Image: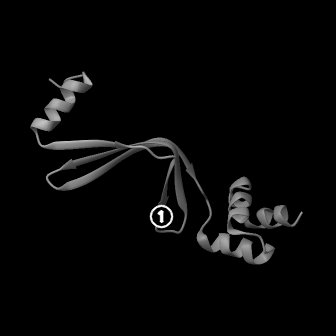
Amino acid sequence: MIPTDPRQMQRMMKQLGIKSEEIQANEVVIKKADGTEMKIVEPQIMIIEMQGQKSFQITGKVQEASFSEDDLKLVVEQTGKTEQEAKIALEKNKGDIAKAILDLQA
């Protein structure tokens, strides 16, 4: 039977040689292979170490950006704005490059 009391669970994990630690963070950004990013805000992060291997468990609100680094660079080049301004415009326009450019030129 798995204990429901957190203290019992910690003791059981310690007996099995499993260490866990919570990390405080404001956001976690995952850069995906296709160049897009996944941002996790208000994350709860646990590092679990067992047999020399570290695993990360991340939960939170996922905000997935639907644009790549190339899209971001294009908006910066076309508008002369900063990367941060271009990123905000792309997020606001849900990755639509043309709308982001028009938005920044207005």
Does residue 90 appear anywhere in the picture?
yes
Measured from the top left, where is residue 3 in percent x and y? 19, 23
Display coloring: one colour
Of residue 45 and residue 91, the one placed in the foreground of this image is 45
State the residue at coordinates (51%, 68%): 34
Q: Classify 24 as above or below 76.
A: above
- Left or right of 76, for residue 3: left
Q: Classify 23 as above or below 4.
A: below
Mark 1, residue position:
32
The part of the image, by quadrant, that contains residue 88 is bottom right
Label tally: 1
State the residue at coordinates (20%, 32%): 10
State the residue at coordinates (53%, 68%): 35
> Which type of secondary structure does the marked residue at label 1 adopt?
loop
Residue farthest toward the front in the current orientation of the protein: 24
State the residue at coordinates (20%, 55%): 53
The part of the image, by quadrant, that contains residue 57 is top left
Instruction: Please state, as top left, top right, bottom left or bottom right, where the C terminus lies in the image.
Output: bottom right
Residue farthest toward the right in the current orientation of the protein: 106
The part of the image, by quadrant, that contains residue 80 is bottom right
Measured from the top left, where is residue 58 in percent x and y? 40, 45
Q: Classify 16 as above or below 33.
A: above
Measured from the top left, where is residue 62 in percent x and y? 53, 46
- Circle 1: residue type: Lys
Does residue 96 appear anywhere in the picture?
no
